[in-house]
Amino acid sequence: MNRFTRSLGSVSARRPWAVIAAWAFALLLVLPLAGLAGGAYADDLVAPGSESEQAMELLEERFPEASAGTAMAVFAAPEGQRLERHRAAVEAAVARIADVEHVAMASGPFTAGTLSPDGRIGFARIAFDVPAMTLGHETNVALEEAIEPARGGGVAAELGGDVVFVNAETETSGAEVAGLLTALVILVVAFGTIVAALVPISLALVAVAAGLGSVTLLANAMDISTAAPTIAAMVGLGVGIDYALFIVARHRENRSAGQDNASALSNAMGSAGAAVLFAGGAVILAMAALALTGLGFLTSIGLSTALVAFFAVAAALTLLPALLSLLGERVHRQWRRGSARPAKKAEHTAWWRFAHRVSGRPRRHLIAASLILLTLAAPALRMETGFPDAGNDSTGTTHRRAYDLLSEGFGPGFNGPLLVVADLTRPGVDADGVPALSRRLAADPGIAEVGAPQTSAAGDTVVLPVIPATAPADAETSRTLERLRDVVPDNVAVSGLTAMTDDLTAQLDDTLPVFVIAILVASVLLLFVVFRSVVLPLKAAAVNLLSIGGAYGVVVAVFQWGWCASLFNLDGTFPIASPLPTIFFAVLFALSMDYEVFLLSRVREEYRVTGDNAESVARGMAATGRVITSAALIMTVVFLSFVANPSPLAKMMGLGLATAIVLDATVVRMVLVPAAMALMGRANWWLPWWLDRLLPRTAGADLTPSRQHGAIPEPGRG
């Protein structure tokens, strides 16, 4: 594989302007097309085969008006006043809402009688002619414009309901830009040159722009989750900077060793370039594996992130050598007079000394590192997952403010109505039995209200709107849903957004073990081929699981238990969003494998030269320690910038990813890996001879720069 990356880099370096022109043409093609013909983002919150999906399909077929999207415009008079005093402003807003595209009906609080007992809060029911999932953010914008004049009249006017919540636009804090600027500072310190620092960031931005443009075009062919661009950009920025950083650092190291620019670049592409290709392949594989969950919105997140990661790898292997060829010595020229500092010998670095200290007492360091990770992971055993509702969102959003007003005026369950759907063509309850069914549902202690039955035009389907007594994301609501499903006849199903998200959570819980096993097996097999070792891939999987567990534990402690909540600007505790453990595992395992590949590829090079296990680990850490630490620091800063996002979901993502990267680059990579490799000794590179012959030769020389050192046999033979 090193021949491929070396050849690709050499071709790009010989024809730099052609490569740059090709990337410019691709961006100029993709970005305008995305703006003109790109699809809209929408969340497919359906668990295939679930009871809620079957009920919604039945409604779409027989009772489409009952399956269409709904929303509410919530109005509140100032404290101490009744909404009646502002009747003209409210009714004018409702009239404007009725003119919004796809609105089939808008019924104001005074005509429908939807006023709170004290008369201060009321809401207008809004019915659409299409399902909520098919409407985009443009609908929310139009509704906002319709109610804006009412706000000018002294009335609090907010928008809530399924349509508004599902199609809400992802908020940003602007901290992402600060994260990039901090990454630039770190790169300048790491390289001592502004040009070399700008190159990785520029490549990452190009990769993310091309990737997100392609994702927008992909939205024409499939539903792409509204969270997909945020997660794809987060990961794309991190890996895009990292991949360029590793190649630029290796190029600089080769130049310091006396190689001319062309040779230094070719050798960097043959060694670090091959590692980038394998590491990027791990990211793409892990993210694409989200399709194994069978859930549309997770599949779209996985494919979107994999697409951006693909562009990050492609940019590192083609655009980067073209730029390095054009820039020449300017890449490593410092802003002060003089040339770049020569690289230190391995024996003169703190990394080399620390690695030998760890390998001198490996058991002690292995136990200490393992205890730290296990302690951090302990809270994950008490993880409670649930799908976030509008009440978990930022108070800066209109759907959160509407949620709070509805809870105040009508009770928390009003924000998550259930739909009880009876198929009268099947055995079970019939039309005459619907009143008794309604009374049975109302008798449940978790139900606040059962609405009037709605019957389809053909008389074959009946819908009962049911209001729980508790909030949508409350665990008690899930228990109420289970009780309702236990007592209704066979021809009755319970649906609604709350039921749909509960079914999603249940399917995620069921598929997570399968997903984890698939990722572990695939990554172990990949490393098995790359490093031609039985032990190292298994060790890599084990230590990566420990760092991921530590990240899970920190997220549980902060968001679920409320530890240090004020530090992250949280105004309460939150269940862990049910999709996050799966997304975390895919992203974190892929990124952990990045550092594993970069470190072990260098250790393997050194082992082929020295044949000394402890020395090869020390030299590998000395060669990659500064670069991996810089890369991890950059990725941590990028991820932490998302903690400033107003959305708790984005905060969870940012904190979890940043925690895992910090643990992976410190406790795991600096202590756990060298200690474990010191204990295993030559067994690190053991591979039965018969298996060595069966494995494809994709690595071998890939991660090994030369064989002229002679005497040491290739790792893996034995």
Image (cartoon, helix red, strand yellow):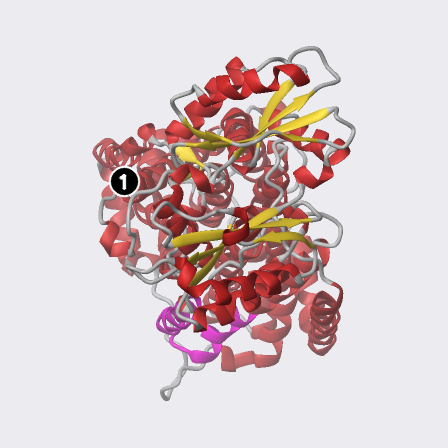
The spot of residue 184 in percent (x, y) is 41, 72
Q: Quadrant of residue 232?
A: bottom right
Q: How many marks?
A: 1
Task: Identify the residue position indicated by label 1 in the image.
Answer: 557
Query: Going 61% across and 65% down the picture, which residue do you hit?
Result: 96
The spot of residue 265 in percent (x, y) is 58, 67
Query: Going 49% across and 67% down the picture, which residue do you hit?
Result: 89
Would you say the magenta stretch is mainly helix, strand or loop? helix
Viewer-proximal residue, 218 or 401? 401
Query: Going 37% across and 50% down the picture, which residue do you hit?
Result: 404
The spot of residue 90 in percent (x, y) is 50, 63
Query: Going 33% across and 32% down the picture, which residue do you hit?
Result: 380
Label 1 secondary element = helix
- View extreme (bottom): residue: 337
Residue 635 appears anywhere in the view: no
Left or right: where does residue 622 sit relative to residue 592? left
Viewer-proximal residue, 303 or 252? 303
The spot of residue 674 in percent (x, y) is 33, 40
Q: Quadrant of residue 431?
A: top right
Q: Residues within 10 Å of mark 1 (few under 14, many from 20)?
A: many
Q: Which residues are magenta?
A: 176-203
Amino acid carrying mark 1 in the image = Ala
Left or right: where does residue 521 sit relative to residue 592? right
Viewer-proximal residue, 338 or 368? 368
